[in-house]
Image: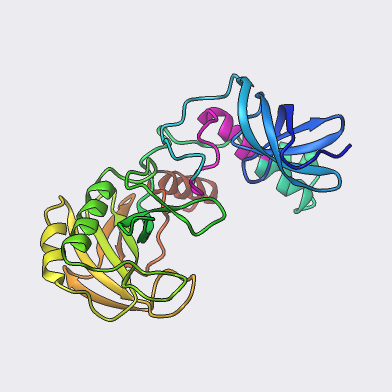
Amino acid sequence: MKYEKNEIVTVTIEDIGSEGEGIGRVEGFTLFVKDAVVGDTVEARIVKNKKTYAYGRLEKVLVPSPFRVEPKCVWHRQCGGCQLQSCSYERQLVFKQDKIRNSLIRIGGFTPEQVDACMEPIVGMEDPFRYRNKAQYPVGTDREGNVVAGFYAARTHNIIAHTDCWLGPVENETILNCILEYMRENKVSAYDEKTGTGLVRHILIRKGFASGEIMVCLVINGREIPRADRLVKGLIQVKGMTSVSISVNTEKTNVIMGTEIVNLYGPGYIEDYIGNIKYQISPLSFYQVNPEQTEKLYKTALEYAGLT
């Protein structure tokens, strides 16, 4: 059976796909529905058709799943950052554990018995929000020409103007609004991907959760930023602000960071701790984005290593 594009179908969601989408079956035909939760019965609009499966857009939840929760973020459906906010965290952990188990069997070639004999329960977070110590926000303009920052809508480079992401620390909103105000007051332009013109491309924010130190790095399509003193003056009002810099990226590319960093304020890095080990983190450093889970991971690895 094949459905027509824009046709509305009713389906019960039985599983979760690798990208967090709900999976249901209607008369043997498989339907993938983004934002649907396992256990939901929904109305979905067919948006893309294949021979044996289709993709649907969630139109209405007819019978909510016992795992369905109210998302904290009002932009969760449009934004490309969060796929599972409508699903309880406990059920998310089940999905993630199943994903690892199935990968070990399908890709790793282990038998289910081998995996089940050694796989231990997943270790989750106490609070799965406000945990990311790094965020990169694209900067652009809205339809009225106003400078905005936020996140890309799913599978696009269209910016959703949104400065308070629930995954990052609360300071991020204050920092973004400070930079946007500086850009408006000093007529600093946002980068336009289509034309390759404009100055500010992205805003990188990093916070040391143990140290409280904060870094801001503006990725710019040039070598300097107008009235940099005004930008720094505004940013250092934020508690914990330790480093302000710019990253030079004049290439027409999807790569966010440039390789040259120009320091405007502070030492050019922040410091943070994982356990009792101190790390020095620059704008280009790799550092795990979830410090709470990183510490659990490292401690668990050390326990298993049994070092003496």
Residue 210 versus residue 286 in the image, above or below: above
- Residue 277 seen in the figure: no
- Identified at 50% across, 44% down, the residue is 78
Q: Answer left or right for 161 relative to 263.
A: right
Based on the displayed image, in which of its 4 quarters is residue 216 positioned? bottom left
Q: Is residue 147 visible?
A: yes
- 6 and 71: which one is in front? 6
Residue 116 at what x, y percent from top left?
Answer: 72, 37
Identify the image quadrant of the N terminus.
Answer: top right
Q: Is residue 38 above or below residue 202?
A: above
The range drawn in magenta is 79-98
**Which is nearer the eye, 245 or 41?**
41
Which residue is rendered at x = 22% and y = 55% of the image?
213
Which colouring convention does the figure follow? rainbow
172 part of magenta stretch: no
Check the image and name the residue furthest to the front. Answer: 144
Does residue 248 sit above or below 1 in this rendering? below
Percent position of residue 303, x then y? 49, 45
Quadrant of the image occupied by residue 113? top right
Which residue ends up furthest to the right in the rendered image? 1
**Is residue 21 left or right of 24 when viewed as pictured?**
left
Residue 123 pos. (x, y %): 52, 37
Q: How many numbered markers are drawn?
A: 0
Relative to 263, is 237 on the left or the right? left
Residue in view at x 32 percent, y 74 percent: 247
Q: Position of residue 219 (x, y in %)?
A: 33, 70
In this rendering, the answer to whether 175 lies above or below 35 is below
Q: Is residue 94 magenta?
A: yes
What residue do we see at 30% from left, 45% from top?
A: 169
